[in-house]
Image (spheres, rainbow, N blue to C red):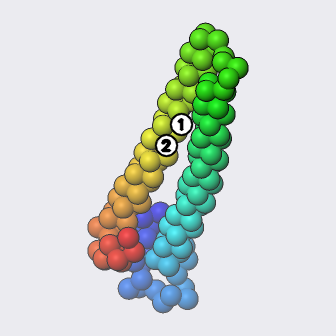
Amino acid sequence: MIYEMVRLQSLDDQKTSVERAGPTEEDFFENVLRQLQDMNVFFKGREQQLYGQLYNLEKDVDIFLKLKNSPKRLSERKIRSTESSLKMAYSEFYLSLSLLQNFQQLNYTGFRKILKKFDKLARSEKGKRFS
């Protein structure tokens, strides 16, 4: 799409905006904005899921601590097994957080590079101002 924009910009000198066919700079930035909004919707949804997971993990830890310290003590084997399960659940949660952070950084870098490439090919600074 970027290459098409540059080609159309050179045609812009030859044609009026009414005669021009194909995507315009406005179309390009609308598409970029739409993609960015889609990415944000996904990110926010995943973030909400992770908040829910954290809430459930905290509840599980509270329940475990109450049972562990209750007068009716759990067996040592059951305590170790539950502690191990909770540690594994927190490790998986941390991995999910890391993946979401990587997703965010990768998409930020990708959008920045797309806009930088647009600016280079279109000989403009609109992409720099957009980001």
Q: Residues within 10 Å of mark 2 (few under 14, many from 20)?
A: some
- Estimate the x, y position of residue 81 in percent, counting from the top left: 60, 15
Front residue (pair 98, 36): 98
Q: Residue at x 56, y 15 (%)?
A: 80
Query: In screen coordinates, is 26 left or right of 76?
Result: left
Q: Residues within 10 Å of mark 1 (few under 14, many from 20)?
A: some
Element carrying mark 2: helix
Which mark is on residue 43? none
Front residue (pair 37, 51): 51
Front residue (pair 12, 59): 59
Query: In screen coordinates, is 29 left or right of 78?
Result: left
Within the image, what quadrant is residue 11 found in? bottom left
Q: Could you give the CA–CA distance between mark 1 and mark 2, rounded to whole angstroms?
A: 6 Å
Quadrant where the C terminus is found in the figure: bottom left
- Kind of residue at disc 2: Leu
Front residue (pair 1, 78): 78
The answer to whether 27 is drawn above or below residue 109 in the figure is below
- Kind of residue at disc 1: Phe
Can you identify the residue that label 2 sits on?
A: 97
- Estimate the x, y position of residue 24 in percent, counting from the top left: 49, 77
Looking at the rendered structure, the number of numbered marks drawn on it comes to: 2
- Estimate the x, y position of residue 130 in percent, counting from the top left: 39, 74
Q: Is residue 110 visible?
A: no
Q: Is residue 15 visible?
A: yes
Element carrying mark 1: helix
Can you identify the residue that label 1 sits on?
A: 93
Circles 1 and 2: CB distance less than 8 Å? yes
Q: Residue at x 55, y 20 (%)?
A: 84
Q: Residue at x 42, y 64 (%)?
A: 2
Within the image, what quadrant is residue 53 found in? top right
